[in-house]
Each structure stands twice: as C-alpha cells, then as structure tokens.
Image (cartoon, rainbow, N blue to C red):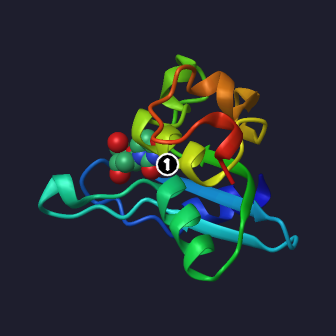
C-alpha cells in the first residue's frame, strides 16, 4: 500500500482533482507503480490501475497482486469512492488470476473474482494463464 499511496502523488489529474495510485506486485517480487493520467479530451484519460498493470506487462513481468489508493477520497464517505472501476476490474482479470488479492486503501482486501463475478471471457477458466 505505501507504493500505491506514493504513486498517487504523481497523478496527472487537473480535471477531476482526484488522484489515484496503484502498485502491482509481480511474480518476481518487483513492484510496479501507476497513477491516473487525465487528458483534456476526457475519454483518453486512464486509471492508475491500468497504468500499473500495463507497465508491468511492458516490462515483461507477471502481475500477481494489486493495491490501489485514492488519495483525494474523503476520509468519511461511501466505499465506492475508493473502489476500482469496472474497466480496471476487467483488465485485472485479464492479467491476474481470479484468486489474486486486490488491496483497496481504506476499504480492505478482496479476491479479484469477488470484485468481478461472472466476468466476460473468451477462454475457459481452466485455460487462463
Ligand atoms: N480513477 C482511477 O484511476 N481508478 C479507478 O479505479 C477509478 C477512477 C481515476 C480516473 C479519473 O482520472 C479520476 O479517477 C476520476 O474519475
């Protein structure tokens, strides 16, 4: 979680002012960080979780576990303000096993399959890497 919190400080979020950091622990023990990067053309923005996951893949690493921290979420407020978005959950499930743990700052830890039940998939569960 410290790495996710640290990564959030690098967020480029001039539109939402909602800084998010993520950190992925990979099978070799390396930790890869990501932050949200927004764009004036709003739809081009990307979440912290996907930046971290894609960076890990680009470095040839295998993501195993993920932490996410929403730096600007109010300390009192609904958990939804801290939860990973649906798109990121789908990407997580593409790149990590359903048993992978997702640590959500201020909320707790969840199994990935619990965060995205009945996920869309083009391959049978048994065939997933
Ligand atoms: N955001 C993330 O980085 N991760 C999520 O799971 C949810 C939302 C970012 C996207 C956008 O830059 C800002 O938070 C507000 O939606």
Q: Residue at x 51, y 68 (%)?
A: 54
Taking the image as drawn, is residue 92 in sight? yes
* Image: 11 above or below 20: below
Q: Position of residue 97 (x, y in %)?
A: 72, 44
Taking the image as drawn, is residue 18 in sight? no
Q: Residue at x 49, y 28 (%)?
A: 81
Question: Who is closer to the viewer here, 10 or 117?
Answer: 117
* Image: 9 above or below 68: below
Q: Residue at x 17, y 54 (%)?
A: 42
Question: Can you identify the residue that label 1 sits on?
Answer: 91
- Quadrant hosting residue 95: bottom right
* Image: 12 above or below 98: below
* Image: 21 above or below 117: below
Left/right of residue 86 with respect to residue 100 in the rendered view:
left
Density class for disc 1 (Cα within 10 Å; few <14, some 14-19, many ≥20) is: some
Which quarter of the figure is the C terminus placed in? bottom right
Left/right of residue 32 with respect to residue 51 in the rendered view:
right
Question: Who is closer to the viewer here, 85 or 99?
Answer: 99
Q: Position of residue 34 (x, y in %)?
A: 55, 66
Q: Position of residue 70 (x, y in %)?
A: 55, 44
Element class at badge 1? helix
Q: Position of residue 114 (x, y in %)?
A: 67, 22
Question: Who is closer to the viewer here, 16 or 128?
Answer: 128
- Kindly give the residue lying farthest to the right in the view shown: 29
Q: How many numbered marks have been drawn onto this rendered protein structure?
A: 1
Left/right of residue 84 with respect to residue 17 in the rendered view:
right
């Amino acid at each position: 979680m410290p790495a996710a919190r640290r990564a959030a400080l690098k967020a480029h979020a001039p539109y939402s002012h909602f800084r998010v950091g993520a950190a992925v622990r990979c099978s070799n023990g390396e930790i890869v960080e990501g932050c949200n990067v927004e764009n004036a053309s709003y739809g081009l923005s990307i979440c912290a979780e996907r930046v971290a996951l894609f960076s890990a893949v680009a470095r040839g690493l295998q993501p195993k576990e993920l932490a996410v921290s929403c730096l600007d979420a109010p300390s009192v407020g609904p958990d939804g303000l801290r939860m990973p978005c649906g798109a990121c959950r789908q990407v997580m499930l593409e790149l990590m096993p359903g048993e992978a743990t997702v640590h959500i700052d201020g909320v707790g830890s969840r199994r990935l399959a619990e965060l995205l039940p009945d996920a869309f998939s083009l391959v049978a569960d048994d065939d997933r890497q």
